[in-house]
Protein backbone atom coordinates (compact mmCIF):
# COMPACT_ATOMS: atom_id res chain seq x y z
CA UNK A 1 0.00 0.00 0.00
CA UNK A 2 2.82 2.34 0.95
CA UNK A 3 4.67 1.49 -2.29
CA UNK A 4 1.56 2.19 -4.38
CA UNK A 5 1.11 5.57 -2.69
CA UNK A 6 4.73 6.48 -3.44
CA UNK A 7 4.30 5.56 -7.11
CA UNK A 8 1.15 7.69 -7.38
CA UNK A 9 2.86 10.69 -5.76
CA UNK A 10 5.85 10.30 -8.09
CA UNK A 11 3.54 10.18 -11.13
CA UNK A 12 1.66 13.31 -10.07
CA UNK A 13 4.96 15.14 -9.47
CA UNK A 14 6.18 14.25 -12.98
CA UNK A 15 2.96 15.47 -14.59
CA UNK A 16 3.09 18.77 -12.68
CA UNK A 17 6.74 19.26 -13.62
CA UNK A 18 6.13 18.65 -17.33
CA UNK A 19 3.10 20.99 -17.31
CA UNK A 20 5.17 23.71 -15.62
CA UNK A 21 7.99 23.35 -18.16
CA UNK A 22 5.54 23.58 -21.07
CA UNK A 23 3.95 26.75 -19.70
CA UNK A 24 7.36 28.38 -19.30
CA UNK A 25 8.34 27.71 -22.92
CA UNK A 26 7.60 30.49 -25.45
CA UNK A 27 4.51 29.63 -27.47
CA UNK A 28 4.70 30.19 -31.23
CA UNK A 29 1.47 30.73 -33.15
CA UNK A 30 1.20 28.91 -36.44
CA UNK A 31 0.01 31.07 -39.30
CA UNK A 32 -3.27 29.47 -40.38
CA UNK A 33 -3.75 28.51 -43.98
CA UNK A 34 -7.50 28.74 -43.52
CA UNK A 35 -9.37 30.16 -40.55
CA UNK A 36 -13.15 30.06 -40.26
CA UNK A 37 -14.81 33.07 -38.64
CA UNK A 38 -18.59 33.11 -39.15
CA UNK A 39 -18.75 36.71 -37.89
CA UNK A 40 -19.31 40.11 -39.41
CA UNK A 41 -16.09 41.79 -40.50
CA UNK A 42 -15.60 44.83 -38.27
CA UNK A 43 -12.51 46.95 -37.68
CA UNK A 44 -12.11 45.42 -34.20
CA UNK A 45 -12.34 41.94 -35.68
CA UNK A 46 -9.76 42.76 -38.37
CA UNK A 47 -7.39 44.13 -35.73
CA UNK A 48 -7.87 41.03 -33.56
CA UNK A 49 -7.18 38.66 -36.45
CA UNK A 50 -4.21 40.55 -37.89
CA UNK A 51 -2.56 40.90 -34.48
CA UNK A 52 -3.00 37.18 -33.84
CA UNK A 53 -1.79 36.17 -37.30
CA UNK A 54 0.52 38.85 -38.71
CA UNK A 55 0.88 38.69 -42.49
CA UNK A 56 1.22 40.96 -45.50
CA UNK A 57 -1.82 39.61 -47.30
CA UNK A 58 -5.26 38.50 -46.17
CA UNK A 59 -7.92 37.12 -48.50
CA UNK A 60 -11.58 36.95 -47.48
CA UNK A 61 -14.22 34.69 -48.97
CA UNK A 62 -17.75 33.60 -48.14
CA UNK A 63 -19.10 30.07 -48.16
CA UNK A 64 -22.42 29.08 -49.66
CA UNK A 65 -23.70 28.85 -46.08
CA UNK A 66 -22.69 32.44 -45.40
CA UNK A 67 -19.63 31.68 -43.29
CA UNK A 68 -16.65 33.98 -43.60
CA UNK A 69 -13.25 32.48 -44.36
CA UNK A 70 -9.96 34.30 -43.87
CA UNK A 71 -6.71 33.19 -45.46
CA UNK A 72 -3.53 34.74 -44.08
CA UNK A 73 -0.35 34.69 -46.17
CA UNK A 74 3.03 36.39 -46.10
CA UNK A 75 2.70 37.30 -49.78
CA UNK A 76 -0.13 37.00 -52.31
CA UNK A 77 1.73 34.11 -53.95
CA UNK A 78 1.30 32.07 -50.76
CA UNK A 79 -2.47 31.94 -51.16
CA UNK A 80 -3.03 28.27 -51.88
CA UNK A 81 -5.11 27.85 -55.08
CA UNK A 82 -6.24 24.42 -53.85
CA UNK A 83 -7.78 26.01 -50.76
CA UNK A 84 -9.49 28.68 -52.80
CA UNK A 85 -10.93 26.07 -55.15
CA UNK A 86 -11.94 23.57 -52.46
CA UNK A 87 -15.47 22.23 -52.16
CA UNK A 88 -15.88 23.68 -48.67
CA UNK A 89 -16.52 27.23 -49.78
CA UNK A 90 -17.16 29.47 -52.74
CA UNK A 91 -13.87 30.80 -54.19
CA UNK A 92 -12.83 34.37 -53.51
CA UNK A 93 -13.73 35.43 -56.97
CA UNK A 94 -17.32 34.49 -57.71
CA UNK A 95 -19.73 35.01 -54.84
CA UNK A 96 -23.17 35.51 -56.37
CA UNK A 97 -25.24 38.24 -54.72
CA UNK A 98 -28.00 38.42 -57.31
CA UNK A 99 -28.44 37.12 -60.84
CA UNK A 100 -26.26 39.81 -62.39
CA UNK A 101 -24.02 40.77 -59.47
CA UNK A 102 -21.04 38.77 -58.22
CA UNK A 103 -18.12 39.74 -56.04
CA UNK A 104 -14.40 39.36 -55.61
CA UNK A 105 -13.17 39.72 -52.04
CA UNK A 106 -9.58 40.79 -51.39
CA UNK A 107 -8.22 42.11 -48.11
CA UNK A 108 -4.58 43.30 -48.16
CA UNK A 109 -3.55 44.81 -44.80
CA UNK A 110 -7.09 45.81 -44.00
CA UNK A 111 -10.73 45.38 -44.85
CA UNK A 112 -10.54 45.91 -48.62
CA UNK A 113 -12.97 44.39 -51.08
CA UNK A 114 -13.36 44.61 -54.85
CA UNK A 115 -16.81 44.02 -56.31
CA UNK A 116 -17.43 43.12 -59.96
CA UNK A 117 -20.66 42.57 -61.83
CA UNK A 118 -21.16 39.49 -63.98
CA UNK A 119 -21.14 41.73 -67.05
CA UNK A 120 -17.65 42.94 -66.09
CA UNK A 121 -16.47 39.35 -65.70
CA UNK A 122 -17.95 38.36 -69.05
CA UNK A 123 -16.61 41.45 -70.82
CA UNK A 124 -13.11 40.77 -69.51
CA UNK A 125 -13.35 37.17 -70.69
CA UNK A 126 -12.08 35.90 -67.35
CA UNK A 127 -12.36 32.55 -65.63
CA UNK A 128 -12.17 31.85 -61.90
CA UNK A 129 -8.45 31.04 -61.79
CA UNK A 130 -7.71 34.16 -63.86
CA UNK A 131 -9.88 36.26 -61.57
CA UNK A 132 -7.86 35.19 -58.55
CA UNK A 133 -4.70 36.24 -60.35
CA UNK A 134 -6.31 39.57 -61.23
CA UNK A 135 -7.28 40.09 -57.60
CA UNK A 136 -3.67 39.53 -56.53
CA UNK A 137 -2.40 42.03 -59.10
CA UNK A 138 -4.91 44.64 -57.94
CA UNK A 139 -4.01 44.33 -54.26
CA UNK A 140 -1.23 46.90 -54.50
CA UNK A 141 -3.60 49.44 -56.07
CA UNK A 142 -6.09 49.52 -53.20
CA UNK A 143 -5.89 52.00 -50.36
CA UNK A 144 -5.18 50.55 -46.93
CA UNK A 145 -7.79 52.49 -44.96
CA UNK A 146 -10.02 50.34 -42.79
CA UNK A 147 -12.51 52.89 -41.49
CA UNK A 148 -15.73 53.55 -43.37
CA UNK A 149 -17.34 56.95 -43.51
CA UNK A 150 -20.99 56.55 -42.59
CA UNK A 151 -22.95 59.64 -43.56
CA UNK A 152 -26.71 59.96 -43.12
CA UNK A 153 -28.42 62.29 -45.57
CA UNK A 154 -31.95 63.26 -46.53
CA UNK A 155 -33.17 63.74 -42.94
CA UNK A 156 -32.26 60.23 -41.73
CA UNK A 157 -34.53 58.67 -44.37
CA UNK A 158 -31.72 57.73 -46.72
CA UNK A 159 -28.19 56.59 -45.98
CA UNK A 160 -25.05 57.03 -48.05
CA UNK A 161 -22.16 54.69 -47.24
CA UNK A 162 -18.78 55.09 -48.86
CA UNK A 163 -15.24 53.99 -48.11
CA UNK A 164 -11.95 55.83 -47.76
CA UNK A 165 -10.39 54.52 -50.93
CA UNK A 166 -11.51 50.93 -50.37
CA UNK A 167 -14.12 48.80 -52.08
CA UNK A 168 -16.86 48.20 -49.53
CA UNK A 169 -20.10 47.87 -51.49
CA UNK A 170 -20.24 44.22 -50.51
CA UNK A 171 -21.13 45.19 -46.95
CA UNK A 172 -24.65 44.40 -48.15
CA UNK A 173 -23.67 40.75 -47.71
CA UNK A 174 -23.32 41.11 -43.94
CA UNK A 175 -26.67 40.26 -42.40
CA UNK A 176 -26.10 42.02 -39.03
CA UNK A 177 -25.23 45.21 -40.89
CA UNK A 178 -28.34 44.92 -43.06
CA UNK A 179 -30.58 44.30 -40.06
CA UNK A 180 -29.16 47.43 -38.45
CA UNK A 181 -29.92 49.48 -41.56
CA UNK A 182 -33.47 48.09 -41.72
CA UNK A 183 -34.07 49.03 -38.10
CA UNK A 184 -32.69 52.53 -38.68
CA UNK A 185 -34.52 53.24 -41.95
CA UNK A 186 -37.70 51.26 -41.27
CA UNK A 187 -39.59 48.75 -43.38
CA UNK A 188 -38.25 47.03 -46.47
CA UNK A 189 -34.68 47.97 -47.29
CA UNK A 190 -33.77 49.26 -50.77
CA UNK A 191 -30.15 49.59 -51.87
CA UNK A 192 -28.48 51.18 -54.89
CA UNK A 193 -24.86 50.18 -55.66
CA UNK A 194 -23.96 52.36 -58.65
CA UNK A 195 -20.20 52.27 -58.05
CA UNK A 196 -17.77 49.86 -56.44
CA UNK A 197 -16.86 51.95 -53.40
CA UNK A 198 -20.26 53.30 -52.32
CA UNK A 199 -23.88 52.40 -51.89
CA UNK A 200 -27.07 54.30 -51.12
CA UNK A 201 -29.83 52.79 -49.00
CA UNK A 202 -33.34 53.81 -48.02
CA UNK A 203 -36.43 52.33 -46.43
CA UNK A 204 -39.97 52.31 -47.80
CA UNK A 205 -41.35 55.00 -45.50
CA UNK A 206 -40.67 57.93 -47.81
CA UNK A 207 -41.21 58.03 -51.56
CA UNK A 208 -39.28 61.30 -51.67
CA UNK A 209 -36.24 59.63 -50.09
CA UNK A 210 -36.55 56.77 -52.58
CA UNK A 211 -36.59 59.24 -55.49
CA UNK A 212 -33.59 61.12 -54.09
CA UNK A 213 -31.66 57.89 -53.63
CA UNK A 214 -32.45 56.81 -57.19
CA UNK A 215 -31.40 60.17 -58.65
CA UNK A 216 -28.17 60.19 -56.64
CA UNK A 217 -27.39 56.63 -57.74
CA UNK A 218 -28.01 57.48 -61.40
CA UNK A 219 -25.70 60.50 -61.18
CA UNK A 220 -22.96 58.42 -59.56
CA UNK A 221 -23.33 55.69 -62.16
CA UNK A 222 -23.13 58.17 -65.06
CA UNK A 223 -20.17 60.13 -63.68
CA UNK A 224 -17.97 57.40 -62.20
CA UNK A 225 -15.39 55.22 -63.91
CA UNK A 226 -15.98 52.50 -61.29
CA UNK A 227 -19.48 51.61 -62.48
CA UNK A 228 -21.10 48.55 -60.90
CA UNK A 229 -24.85 48.09 -61.36
CA UNK A 230 -27.58 50.58 -62.32
CA UNK A 231 -30.43 48.77 -60.57
CA UNK A 232 -32.30 48.87 -57.28
CA UNK A 233 -31.93 45.91 -54.93
CA UNK A 234 -34.57 45.09 -52.31
CA UNK A 235 -33.88 42.99 -49.22
CA UNK A 236 -36.87 40.67 -48.76
CA UNK A 237 -36.99 37.73 -46.35
CA UNK A 238 -33.22 37.46 -46.17
CA UNK A 239 -32.56 37.57 -49.93
CA UNK A 240 -31.81 40.27 -52.50
CA UNK A 241 -34.13 40.98 -55.42
CA UNK A 242 -33.29 43.09 -58.47
CA UNK A 243 -35.59 45.75 -59.92
Image: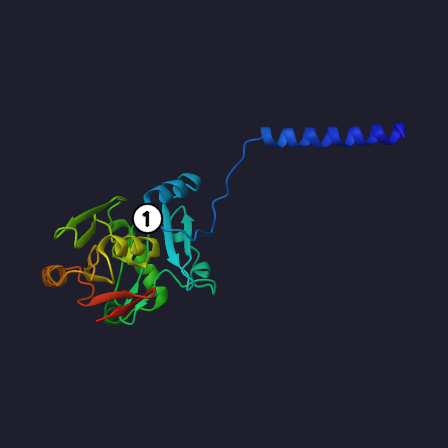
The colour scheme applied to this rendered structure is rainbow
Q: Please report the residue visible at 54 percent of the width from the left and 31 percent of the height from the top.
A: 26
What is the quadrant of residue 132 in the picture? bottom left
Residue 227 left/right relative to 113:
left
Per the image, label 1 sits on a secondary structure element best described as loop
What is the quadrant of residue 204 in the picture? bottom left
**Residue 137 vs residue 143, the one in the foreground:** 143
**Residue 181 vs residue 57, the one in the foreground:** 181
Q: Please report the residue visible at 25 percent of the width from the left and 56 percent of the height from the top.
A: 169
**Residue 101, above or below 34:** below
Residue 84 left/right relative to 193:
right
**Residue 158 vs residue 131, the one in the foreground:** 158
Q: Residue 78, position in %: x, y?
A: 42, 52
Circle 1: is it few (<14), some (14-19), or many (20+) Cα within 10 Å? Answer: many
Q: Please report the residue visible at 24 percent of the width from the left and 61 percent of the height from the top.
A: 187
Q: Residue 15, position in %: x, y?
A: 71, 32
Residue 70 left/right relative to 164:
right
Can you say which quadrant of the picture contains the C terminus?
bottom left
- The residue tagged 1 is 108
**Residue 53 vs residue 220, the one in the foreground:** 220
Q: How many marks?
A: 1
Can you say which quadrant of the picture contains the N terminus?
top right
Q: Residue 231, position in %: x, y?
A: 19, 68
Kindly tell me whether residue 164 is visible in this rendering.
Answer: no
Q: Please report the residue visible at 25 percent of the width from the left and 66 percent of the height from the top.
A: 234
Kindly tell me whether residue 131 is visible in this rendering.
Answer: yes
Amino acid sequence: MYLLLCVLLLGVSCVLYLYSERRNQPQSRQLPNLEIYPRIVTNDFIQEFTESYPADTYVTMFSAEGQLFLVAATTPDEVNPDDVASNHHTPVLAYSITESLSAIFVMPEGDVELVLSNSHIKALGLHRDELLQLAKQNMAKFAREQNLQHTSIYNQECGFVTANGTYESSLILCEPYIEGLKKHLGGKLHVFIPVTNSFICTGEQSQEAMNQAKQAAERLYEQSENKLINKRLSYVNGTWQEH
